[in-house]
Amino acid sequence: DIQMTQSPSSLSASVGDRVTITCRASQDIINYLAWFQQKPGKAPKSLIYAASSLQSGVPSRFSGSGSGTDFTLTISSLQPEDFATYYCQQYNDYPLTFGGGTKVDIK
Amino acid sequence: QVRLVESGGGVVQPGRSLRLSCDASGFSLRAHAMHWIRQAPGKGLEWVAVMSFDENDKDYADSVKGRFTISGDSSKSTLYLQMNSLRVEDTAVYYCAREGLGPLNDAFDIWGQGAMVTVSS
């Protein structure tokens, strides 16, 4: 199975901050990497697919980069509605696997 | 409007069975692969099962293989997850999710709101 490791597991930030979350795969997944946002008690929301492509309706302050084994999710200017937990997920091979999540809370 | 709505969750004793449903609207199940993903209380996301758009191919996580079955009824626009021999560790919110279309866009793009399954004596 492909292991997905996210860092940090949590971070505190202020509105307007630039936030970066990293995700590392245990083997090459090319760019079959997705990012999701989840708020407490809610279903995950799809943000990014193919490592860097925004899902429809996702604000442009979200961006993704990387290929192979190392990937990054960046929020250019954190907004109040962005405080949530973020997960990466590989879909290069089954079983599909997720990172452990990064909780972004208010400093 | 594209939407997924799960139902059928509840409290069940270990060893018993439960069937979850996922009603799809705004698109055809025959056009998309569909997945089930679960999240134990306070934990991360775990992929459970997938069914291809034509229902010919199915795959499962090792943790549920042989106990869970994914199926669909395209005439009803409904996806199912039959869960047998349930264990305490199957306790989770279960989400259905649609797989996108196009090169590299076969990630999940739409999620349901989730159905809670509690396995307890």
Image: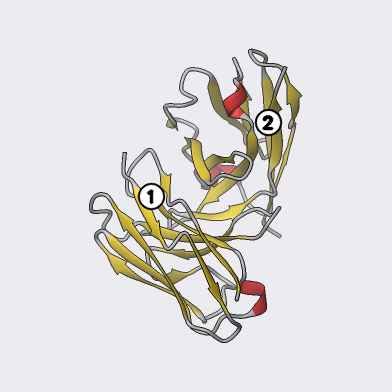
Residue A15 image-quadrant placement: bottom right
Q: Residue at x 66, y 74 (%)?
A: A81
Measured along the vertical axis of the image, is residue B41 above or below residue B85? below
Chain under disc 1: A
- The secondary structure type at the circle numbered 2 is strand
Q: Which residue is mark 2?
A: B20
Q: Position of residue A62 (x, y in %)?
A: 50, 76
Height in image: B40 above or below A9?
A: above
Please indicate, yes or no, whether residue B76 appears anywhere in the rendered image: no
The residue depicted at 52 percent of the width and 47 percent of the height is: B32
A70 left or right, relative to A102: left
Dot 1 amino acid type: Tyr
* Spatial separation of the CA atoms under disc 2 and disc 1: 24 Å
Q: Quadrant of the C terminus of chain A?
A: bottom right
Is residue A14 in sight in this rendering? yes
Return the chain for callout 2: B
Horizontal side of B55 relative to B28 (left or right) equals left
Residue count near mark 2 (Cα–Cα under 10 Å), binned few <14, some 14–19, many ≥20: many
In the picture, residue B117 is in which quadrant? Answer: top right
In the displayed structure, does residue A85 sit left or right of residue B25? left
Which residue is nearer to you in this view: B99 or A10? A10
Q: Residue at x 65, y 60 (%)?
A: A39
What residue is shown at x 30% (from left), y 53% (from top)? Answer: A25
> In the rendered view of the protein, which quadrant contains the N terminus of chain A?
top left
Q: Residues within 10 Å of mark 1 (few under 14, many from 20)?
A: many
Q: Are marks 2 and 1 on the same chain?
A: no
Question: Which of A33 and B55 lies nearest the eye of the viewer?
Answer: A33
Image: B107 above or below B86: below
Q: Secondary structure at mark 1?
A: loop
Q: Which residue is mark 1?
A: A91
Percent across and percent down for residue B34 are: 53, 42
Residue type of the residue flagged with mark 2 = Leu
